[in-house]
Amino acid sequence: MNVIGIVGWKNSGKTTLASALIRELSARGLTVNSIKHAHHGVDVDQPGTDSYQHREAGAQEVILAGGQRFAIMHELRGAEEPTMDELLARLGPCDWVVVEGFKTHSHPKIEVHRQDSPRAPLFLKDDGIIAVAADYAPDFNGPVFDPNDIAGIADFVLNQAAAPATQQHREDA
């Protein structure tokens, strides 16, 4: 499976770009899965529901299944947060995984950065960033896309899968 990350600071447009990229790759006939790294206390289940009561009773994993989808909730119960590699191993077969977040993992990433951001771009310290989507012309030694150029970003991502592994990452400066 191929993996591309979307990273950036809060409110930079990561979710917008990740969603648009997933939509574009899917429209091209590819199977796409995603991983979204969330804040520490995220909870997809609500108090009072049956599945919530199962987790509260001590179940380590609860599968909530219906006619349209299913979700697996796994309680860490003090264990370490799973690594991105461990999460990737749990996904079903697909052509691409779009990962939002996991800034410090070594997978290839596209950074979303805004000119009005008070924080420095991540690409200054992360050689895993292979392209930037920005609303200005950053001083980046690689492809820079307008964040709205979803087709261009998708073309770039698909070309990365075809490139030899040695060309997928910039060399250390």
Image (cartoon, rainbow, N blue to C red):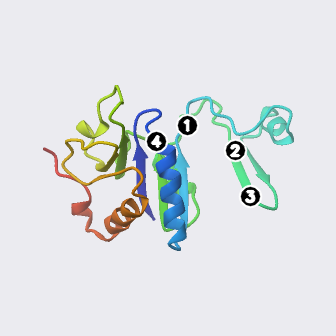
- Under mark 2, the amino acid is Met
The residue under label 4 is 13
Q: Position of residue 106 (x, y in %)?
A: 34, 47
Q: Secondary structure at mark 4?
A: loop
Q: Residue at x 16, y 46 (%)?
A: 172
Against 44, residue 144 (above or below) is below
Tell me how far mark 1 sits from mark 2, CA to CA. Answer: 14 Å
Tell me how far mark 4 sits from mark 1, CA to CA. Answer: 15 Å
View extreme (top): residue: 118
- Under mark 4, the amino acid is Gly
Report the side of 34 relative to 69 (left or right). left
- Under mark 1, the amino acid is Ala
Report the side of 20 relative to 55 (left or right). left
Tell me how far mark 3 sits from mark 2, CA to CA. Answer: 13 Å
Q: Nearer the viewer, mark 2 or mark 4?
A: 4
Looking at marks 2 and 4 on the same chain, the residue that comes earlier in the sequence is marked by 4
| Mark sitting on residue 71 | none
| Mark sitting on residue 73 | 2
Q: Answer few, some or many: residues within 10 Å of disc 4's Cα (few below 14, many 20 plus, some between 14 and 19).
A: some
Looking at marks 1 and 2 on the same chain, the residue that comes earlier in the sequence is marked by 1
| Mark sitting on residue 69 | 3
Q: Position of residue 1 (x, y in %)?
A: 45, 65
